[in-house]
Amino acid sequence: MSDSLDPEDWAQSRERARAMLDAVIDRMERYDEGAVWNAPEGVQPDLTPDKLGQGEAAADAALRGLLPYGVGNTHPRFFGWVHGAGTPSGLMADIIAAALNANCGGRNTGAIKVERAVIDWARQLFGLPDDASGLITTGTSAATIIALKVARDEALGADVRETGVRDQKSLVGYTSAGGHSCLDRAFDLLGLGKSALRKIEMDERGRLDLAALDSAIERDRADGLTPFIVCATAGTVNRGAIDNLSGCADIAAREALWFHVDAAFAAALQLSDAHRHRLSGIERASSIGFDFHKWMQVNYDAGCVLIRDEAAHRAAFSDDPDYLTGLERGLGSAKPWPVDYGPELSRGFRALKVWAQLIEHGPDRLGQIVDANIAQAAYLADRVTREPGLELLSYEELNICCFRYVGDGSADDLDGFNQELVIRLQESGIAAPSTTRIDGKLAIRVNITNHRTQLSDMDVLVEGVLEMGG
Ligand SMILES: *Cc1c(COP(=O)(O)O)cnc(C)c1O
């Protein structure tokens, strides 16, 4: 048995890492070739005893074997859900992060300074005050749980951390019927119950109806309940609708409610000179949850929560056990630490990918990707409108376009037909849209958050749909 500390072994490991890097970079150079998605038939990851400890060659082959089997979001014609495409700087940053093997829960390290710099940049991007706080998270789901925990504790008082939520029926919050399920999940996890999150109806463009919000708050107060939060959405998953953020902020201010904005992917509009105005009002948020790994193209995973009131943020998470007490100097200094702002102690160095992305490409270039994707969705919506066999179901002038194949209008099960069509598009490898329902109709949903996508990819998609449909 070899001694893993043997310098010879280390040298060999480094050579293997170099060879693997070549394989990975080759793969990145060919992202636009081949099928968007390959069913993972060739992946056999079982760890039965005969597979364990087979040595370096087996490990290298197993790792290389995974390369063709991503979800497909690195390919220019991946249009499903909302996935970012990643960049080579993400690869480099992850290599450095692994080499540092940084644990970013706290302590006086360069990694923590990088995370603070990223949060500071994000805080300025959205126009939050200098003393606002934040945390890099796995994504918007985690960011939402953190933001809503701070909001809940503010509403119930600091004691709730000791006593727990005793009267979970009293706190209620609001989002639109197009709000993301991560909000429901946060209500569940925070002991408030999903039913305490009211789903307010949407207007014809998929935005939270402000008059309906007013009435819901009034009704709940009359019923003796305690409204505590309005959760606006900037960029709904289904259609890319952006709530009237200023209108929501006004209502939240008037009613003394926490104003949270879920800007998971549309946060990237803030990088675009042409589209920034669409997020107007976000600077009034009590908290914002958003993703770097979607439209900002940072490799998975990296999201962020920003909280206007730093003291409230820290009060909701800081515990200060003896073994994490801050010191004046040395490794134990430079408090507060990320562990004071979120639920995790040990955590990886996600901030580095974001930092590297910003240094390499810069906000302007990232904003141009946003502009290009919006133009591609407009082109697609226009082409769909002009194709007699297709029907446009929703398009909110953002990066999402939903439509369906109707052919000559004679088919009776259009929902089943379009569902099958999308599966076939995915299986053929031509393109990978997803599906959703718009006004009850099953839609082919095309989301474009990909710097590799070209206008011509829209034509390939439409022709693929027409061919498979007809
Ligand atoms: C993707 C998304 C989320 C969830 O974010 P994750 O990073 O996947 O956890 C929440 N809200 C909206 C609007 C989203 O698009």
Image: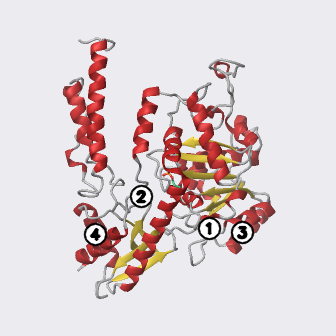
Mark 4, secondary structure of its residue = helix
State how far apart marks 1 and 2 are (Cα). Answer: 21 Å
Which mark is first along the chain, 2 or 1?
1
* Above or below, comparing residue 211 to residue 22 in the picture: below
State how far apart marks 4 and 1 are (Cα). Answer: 35 Å
Which mark is first along the chain, 4 or 2?
4
Give the residue type at disc 2: His
Of tags 4 and 3, the one toward the viewer is: 3
Where is residue 405 drawn, in percent x and y?
Answer: 33, 79
Residue hosting label 2: 451
Q: Is residue 197 visible?
A: yes
State how far apart marks 3 and 2 are (Cα). Answer: 32 Å
Mark 3, secondary structure of its residue = helix
Determine the image quadrant of residue 345.
Answer: top right
Q: In this view, does 132 lie to the left or right of 31?
A: right
- Mark 1, ligand 1, within 8 Å: the answer is no
Q: Which mark is residue 420?
A: 4
Which mark is first along the chain, 3 or 4?
3
Where is residue 278 drawn, in percent x and y?
Answer: 62, 67
Determine the image quadrant of residue 327.
Answer: top right
Q: Residue 269 carries which label?
A: none
Mark 2, secondary structure of its residue = loop
Give the residue type at disc 4: Glu
Mark 1, secondary structure of its residue = helix
Q: Which mark is residue 278?
A: 1
Residue hosting label 3: 247
Give the residue type at disc 1: Arg
Image quadrant holding the C terminus, namely bottom left
